[in-house]
Amino acid sequence: MANTVSAKKMTRKIAKRTAINRTRRSRMRTFIRSVEEAIASGNKDTAISALRAAEPEIMRAAQKGILPKNTASRKVSRLTHRIKALA
């Protein structure tokens, strides 16, 4: 348990940051799920529009430090390849 004033303040800051990060990660995953559901249904047009909405969210998460930049690029790339394979 934090005893000093600065340690107590840090626990408050960490809790606030954790809540923000959890929200951002959840939002990103929701967008990815919508793309994967569109791919599973086989609807290419819906999948493309879902990817267009998801890509900025994924990159924003990488920019905010939720996940590494290369991981975000890899996720977008793999989703794009899966959509192209629908043809």
Image: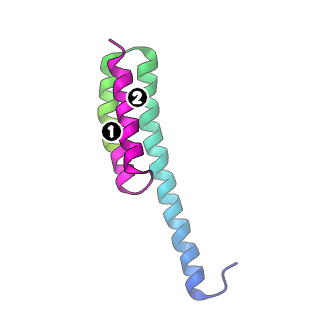
Left or right for 85, reference 24: left
Q: Which residues are magenta?
A: 58-87
Q: Which mark is residue 35?
A: 2
- Please tell me which of labels 2 and 1 falls first in the chain: 2
| x and y, in percent, of residue 18 in the image | 53, 61
Left or right for 30, reference 56: right
Q: Quadrant of the C terminus?
A: top left
Left or right for 79, reference 11: left
Asked if the residue under mark 1 is in contact with the one under mark 2, i.e. CB atoms within 8 Å, the reply is no
Point 43% across, 30% down: residue = 34
Image position of 28 with respect to 64: above or below: above
| x and y, in percent, of residue 2 in the image | 66, 81
Point 48% across, 56% down: residue = 21
Image position of 46 with respect to 13: above or below: above
| x and y, in percent, of residue 44 in the image | 33, 17
Q: Is residue 65 magenta?
A: yes
Image position of 14 with respect to 84: above or below: below
Residue type at tag 2: Val
Q: Quadrant of residue 51?
A: top left
Q: Residue furthest top?
A: 87
Point 31% across, 43% down: residue = 56
Question: Callout 1: 10 Å neighbours few (<14), some, many (20+)?
Answer: many
Label 1 sits on residue = 55
Q: Is residue 69 magenta?
A: yes
